[in-house]
Image: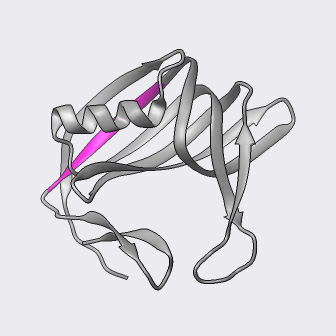
Amino acid sequence: MDYKAGSIGRVFIARIDHDEDLLAEFVKLARSEEIRYAFFMLIGAVKNMQVVTGPKEDTVPPDPMWRSITGACEILGIGNILWKDGDPSIHLHAALGKGNDVTVGCLRDSVDAYLTTEAIIFEISGIAAERVYDDRYGISRMVL
């Protein structure tokens, strides 16, 4: 394990509106407010997304299992904002549900808000971290 201690900096509340790209909006906010490191939680509804629901097998590097969701569903998410190669990088895991159908995974590429999605973002100050691609694992990992 590698770790650093920091403290809560600014706190943001945000509303992502119908048809806005949730991930793109987080990137825009991180750029405009210069949020370098943050943790966030969100609730609401989303649609039109790609979700990684785990590796096909327990191999390193992983071969991800993708699920495409086009219809609207509820979301309960948690994630972080770090920077990678000079740009904000969003890592969002979420539970997604509609009726009895529930999916949990990592949301990638783009995610459209349905009606509204609300987020609380906690900036972390006093640390330095970034997301760096790791050839060994075949993923981008947090580096402190």
Question: Image point 19% across, 60% down: which residue?
Answer: 6
Q: Position of residue 32 (x, y in %)?
A: 18, 31
Identify the colour scheme used.
one colour
Question: Image point 36% across, 35% down: which residue?
Answer: 26
Residue 42 in sight from this viewpoint: yes
Q: Position of residue 8 (x, y in %)?
A: 21, 48
Question: Image point 28% across, 74% down: which residue?
Answer: 3
* Residue 16 left/right relative to 55: left
Residue 59 vertical placement versus 89 (above, below): below
- Residue extending farthest to the left is 126
Residue 55 vertical placement versus 74 (above, below): below
Considering the image in quadrants, where does the N terminus appear?
bottom left
Q: Position of residue 129 (x, y in %)?
A: 23, 64
Residue 84 lies in the magenta stretch: no
* Residue 86 left/right relative to 13: left
Residue 27 vertical placement versus 20 (above, below): below
Magenta part, dominant SS: strand
Give whichever of 75, 90 is nearer the camera.
Answer: 90
Find the magenta span and give its range. Answer: 118-125
